Amino acid sequence: MGGEMAADAETSFRTPPAGMKMAAYWFWSSLPDDAEIESQLRDFRDKGYGTILIQARLSLPRHVYLGEAFLERYRRAVEEMQRLGLVAGLYDDYNWTSGQAGGRTVEGAPHLRERHLFWATVDGLEGEIGGIEAPFATGIGADIAGWIYEAGRPVFDEWEIVAALAHPPCCDDPSALRDVGAHMRLMPEGDGCRFTLDGMLAPGERLTVFIAARCRTSRLINYLLPEAGARFVEVGLEPFARALAGHMGTTLTFLFYDQPGPQFYSWRQKTGALGNSPLYAPPLRAAVEAAGDEPFAAVLFALVHQLGPATAALRLRFYQAYGRLMAEGFFLPVRDFCRRHGLRFTGHEILPHIGGFALNGGFSSIDPRVAPAVDFFGIDALRDETAVDVNNFSAQLSPRLGDSVARAHGRSRTMAEIYATATRTERRGAGQWELSPATLRAQAIRLHMAGVRQVIMHALYQSDGMDDDPRLFVNPRFDFAPGINFEPWWGHHGDLAAETARLSAFLDEAVPETPVAVLYPLSTAYVEGPRHAHAAHFGAWCAGLAALSAGHMILDEDSLSDATVSGGVLAANGLRFRALILPAATQIAAPALATIAAFAAAGGAVWLSGPVAPALGEATRRLCRQWPQPPDAGELHRLVAGLETEAPAIEADDVVLRFVGRDGAGAWRVVLFNDSERPAAVRVAVNGDYEIRDAGTGAISPIAKAGWLGLRLAPQDIVCLRTFPRSGSAPDVDLVQSDEVVEIRALGDGWSFQAGPDGKPGPISVGQGWQTQGYAALSGTGHYACRFSLAEAADVHLDLPGVSVAVEADIDGRDCGRRARPPFRLDLGRLAAGEHMLRLRVSNTAANRYYAGTPFAGEPWPDESGLTAPPRLLLLCPRKR
């Protein structure tokens, strides 16, 4: 039969491989003994994890990292992973910020420390550089600053004049710049320096001086220097290769880098269009000057000030050369290490859009152009597998961008590291011990539907830390909590891990239907900077398309340049588009402009918002639709609905997220997720055969026929549907079924409660959580018990209107299931007439214990826990047997 699924794909769905199961960082705060290694890794495997990356955190003394004892314990852990059938990944550094090797890269090689370029513009003959700060790093806390900086703060030395220019106050011509670099004197002073021009300024002239300095206290490297990358490999990676001989490329299969990049410095005299100091090294001058005719000093001037029509080209020249040197200095040596040892190369750079959709809405205080943090598509060309960062538990850009980046290089889908920052306190590193399994499950589903193949959890903990110590990071308890395995609901984790892995396997076989392409405006980002309208416009379009579940993907300028146009369809990266969005893109590479013009001329829909690239041309603009701001949800819906598509029609409430794609057998794969707290009705135009995959159990229904297929999704329900259209008619099928409830009985009284299995039982109200009834700091599992009687035998469901946050139940000693997300409804089966004993084991989160007495508790406090509304028995109409 057409549309039949290959046996290996069916097996992959029922029993997903490690690459689709959840992965996790395993935070080490000390060196584990054999018992810890064996018990924790076995526990991780049993809870659904397939891949583990050991990560040495700040709570592990830095001098221990990469020492003989550390590497011996690391090897022992990898040996245990091999025995348990787990995959190991090599997280490549201490704490984070790849390249520093816990400080070893720059030890004995001080010339490799990060070296930055500062500038000042003055009206006289002298000025200064001073007040240099690293707010991005030091704002996280003193202990982080103490890890990055030997003195706990940045201190600079080895000052040198790089360029000095006399110029008119408003300069629009490079020829008006007067190079006075040979006449500058430099005097180090305190933590900065002073400079003086030995000469005269013409009337009205100003002086702009660019000065380089080394941060002599920083443990971070100068990523522009190939010798820095080579030394990192030598002192930071080769020790792993030696210690793990025999496991490299077998049990340990990939290397993961994390946010390589310099610090983001600011200083009192900073002005102009660049928000932070870029790195500097002599090769930078040579690379920039080799790419064009203007001298290096003029290019630097154009970075911070307008220089008329030449500005855009000069900025592009600088950032392209700068990014290329960082790739050659860091990424290539690490990739070569991977090649030598049979490892896949992956990881993620700083993502300034983290946690949202706007391109610079996450780390909004930085200028990402000074780090490997803008050219995501270019960096991915060096990787073997794409990876992105995800912050917290809401919809965001990263997964879709990651999938788009992967497809630009002949791959698909992405890894996604998800970490939690605090929402109840300003101390972000305190994390979210209040995380519920329902929240985690919903986010994992969203990520997979948006393009993620494997979720990497940040993190599983070796230790839950110490009481009475609220220091961030030093106490591992507050190192971007939660440590998922120390949550009271950890026993439920295996269910959500298995379900989401099957979802990933189901999606992996499908090429998504993508009628809409969004341009990633790299040239605009380089020229205009992170505060320009393109960042918000890009985010608004992507957020709107995501909310509509409109199939879309992101194209970079290279992909657009290589795309083909035929019959109003734009084909790029293995996908087909009928609309292209240009979000406030004022700078677009010429080959991409040619494709845009051809697409518009062929009848393709080109949608513009905000300012437009002048080079687009008036003739092409007349063929486009343009808005000052991205259209609202209603108008965007109408735009997308007007595009042709071969995908099956879906009628659903807005709360239902949808994925549609076609697999290798020609069948459509449809995923529907009710991302809300209310039921939702759905109709799918099957027009042929269909089958339903149950991601929770791995069951696959027999193939059936339908015209329109009707479904009703309970809150947080997910359906995986495979359809294969056929000629001829088929009847409409309505799968909306429910048991007929003949009686509802509230169980509001007579409950007993004990805190844990060894607690002393006592009466409790089930109308409010245990936190209000003498158990404010209880984080764990509360045991509820209640007797009730039935006058006659009945089929019974247990409905739990209020559960915080996960429940297991048994009736008369017989297990009847568990639930860690709404709706909390369990089937008690057929109960005889007479008395019955109902027992519920309810687990909350760790927040009430771990945040008690700390500055991180927030309001309201304590968190709701246990049963918060009276349970109900639903007596059903007798079932056919």
Image: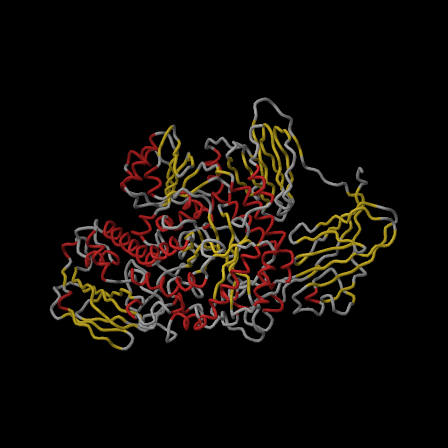
What count of labels does the image hold?
Answer: 0
Q: Quadrant of the C terminus?
A: top right
- Residue in view at x 27 percent, y 64 percent: 117
Q: Is residue 870 above or below residue 583?
A: below
Relative to 729, is 180 on the left or the right? Answer: left
Relative to 832, is 855 on the left or the right? Answer: left
Q: In this view, does 135 lie above or below 639?
A: below
- Residue in view at x 74 percent, y 62 percent: 783
Give the x, y percent position of residue 354. Answer: 45, 55
Residue 691 in view (yes/no): yes
Residue at the bottom extreme? Answer: 190
| Rendering quarter of residue 268 | bottom left
Q: Which of 5 and 466 is in front in this view?
A: 5
Residue at the top extreme? Answer: 728
Q: In which quarter of the image is the N terminus?
A: top right
Residue 276 in view (yes/no): no
Q: In this view, does 630 lie above or below 372?
A: above
Relative to 810, is 846 on the left or the right? Answer: left
Give the x, y percent position of residue 572. Answer: 38, 37
Give the x, y percent position of residue 466. Answer: 57, 73
Relative to 276, is 429 on the left or the right? Answer: right
Instruction: Name the colouring of the figure.
Output: secondary structure
Q: Nearer the viewer, residue 104 or 716?
A: 104
Give the x, y percent position of residue 32. Answer: 54, 68
